[in-house]
Amino acid sequence: MAVAAAHGSAHKPHTADGSTRTPIKHLVIIFQENVSFDHYFGTYPFAANSSGQRFLGDHHVRVNGLYDTPGLNGHGTLLTNNPNTDASGNQANPRRLDPANINDVLLCDQDHGYADEQKAFDGGKMDQFVTSVGTGSGTSGTGQACKATDVMNYYDGNTVTGMWNYAKSFAMSDNFFANTFGPSTPGAINLASGNTGNVGIQINGANTDGDTVPDGQGGSSLIDDAQPYYDDCSTRDAVSMKGTNIGDELNARGITWGWFQGGFAPTGYDSSGRAVCGSHHVGLAGDDAVATVGDYIPHHEPFQYYASTSNLHHVQPTNPALIGTSADGANHQYDLGAFWTALAEDNLPSVTYLKAAAFQDSHPGYSDPIDEQAFVVGVVNAVQNSRFWNDTAIIIAYDDSDGWYDHVLGPIVNQSAVADDALVATGNCGSGTTATQGRCGYGPRLPLLVISPYAKPNFVDHRTTDQSSILRFIEDNWDLGRIGADSSDVKAGTLNGMFDFREEHRASASKLILDPATGLVISH
């Protein structure tokens, strides 16, 4: 099906392998961790200045020749009149997290389980976040006691400075959702295939410890963070996924692609010849091997769940010129270092997925927005300064919300009635049923940014989209067709409203080079 341009006439459809239906020839997806929309953008474009930071986001700041940044569905009056309360019944209003306070930068991980997140939504009242998903035990990376009310808190442009600058200069969405509730792995699988209901092999208790639930079709749906079955570096409960993913579709057309993740390269092999993923780094939160297994987190790598796209032994590419092809021995699964090698060799795959090493992936508990910014800005600057920029789109998206407060209930496009559902009542996610159970959603609202010469500048898209909308964009742009078989790609909203595909728009667009350390503008 042809995709119309989002202003001006539609581009001529193409059908040959590698050709595209829009001017976008290269897509880079930076897939980060555990951020709700309100957690990063709830007060956008207005930022506070309580500790002497530069005042960012105010409507008096001139951006792209425009004084006015478009409004979005943010906190509004919920900053001072929020329905959430603490365990004692006291009102729990959101609090701005101050970058001058390290305790506000290094946060506790929140509860973001499939059932508990639904309970927090309370049938759309959005008033049970503190009591259902707020973390009230343990300590943060600075040793501070976790408080359940912290789940309400948010950053602004004085902390997530780079993200706000990208939003002001390019396009963002305020109506983008996780396909379902729950943690990282379901979000990653939805990015890859739009279907968490095709669980295959289950080992080490994956079918008994809450990783999966009956799908109503004689099989199982994945709702938790079981590790990938086809991965030497998995160490505990694991599952495989059946069916087709976007990698299979790209391979069928001979289109170059790859998933690049920090720490994927083995640091050695054990006595059985299994790869050992021992890479680790120190960020603001300390050594990522303390809170996690190190840089590489297996359950963040969706293509390792599928036999067709896995790289079981973490084989490294044989030739930099072959990265992204099916001929380099790595089966399209790479260490993050291979991305930098390919970019330096002028060999960017058509579709590139990037996953930061743990310390830079933004996940609370072992990462933070400052370390995340260094990674994201470094990638965006490099792509902008490459020969690929004029036909590239960079998407910044997230796998789940970490349970952080967001005030918007999305449409429930997948009802479910398994024991773990709790959106309306115990065992109830909506009044109807869909073909596959255990996929209650949409889940939480998440940030989505599009950075491209073809992105509409200083633009907020209000149309409803979800994680599989990224999958749909790839399918449409490279004319791949739909995965189908209950994949959510069939009903996902399109991202095209965030683009202006006219050539004159690209010609007038400018780069935005930021400082990776501060997120501030170096050149525009």
Image (tube, grey):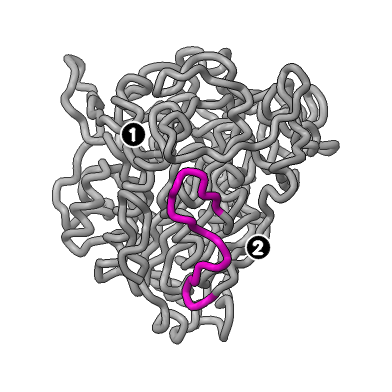
Stretch of the chain drawn in magenta: 47-66
456 to the left or right of 70: left
Q: Is residue 400 above or below residue 251?
A: above
Q: Quadrant of residue 290?
A: top left
Q: Is residue 459 above or below residue 292?
A: below
Q: Residue at x 55, y 68 (%)?
A: 60
Q: Quadrant of the C terminus?
A: bottom left
167 to the left or right of 368: right
441 to the left or right of 518: right
Secondary structure mainly formed by the magenta segment: loop
Q: Is residue 472 above or below residue 115?
A: below
Whole-percent x, y for residue 497 in the image: 59, 69
Secondary structure at badge 2 equals loop
Q: Residue at x 16, y 53 (%)?
A: 320
Q: Residue at x 37, y 54 (%)?
A: 519
Q: Amino acid at mark 2?
A: Gly
Whole-percent x, y for residue 58 in the image: 55, 61
Disc on res. 71:
2
Is disc 1 surrounded by few (<14), some (14 to 19) or many (20+) residues within 10 Å? many
Q: Which residue is mark 1?
A: 359
Q: Is residue 500 above or below residue 369?
A: below
Q: Amino acid at mark 1?
A: Phe
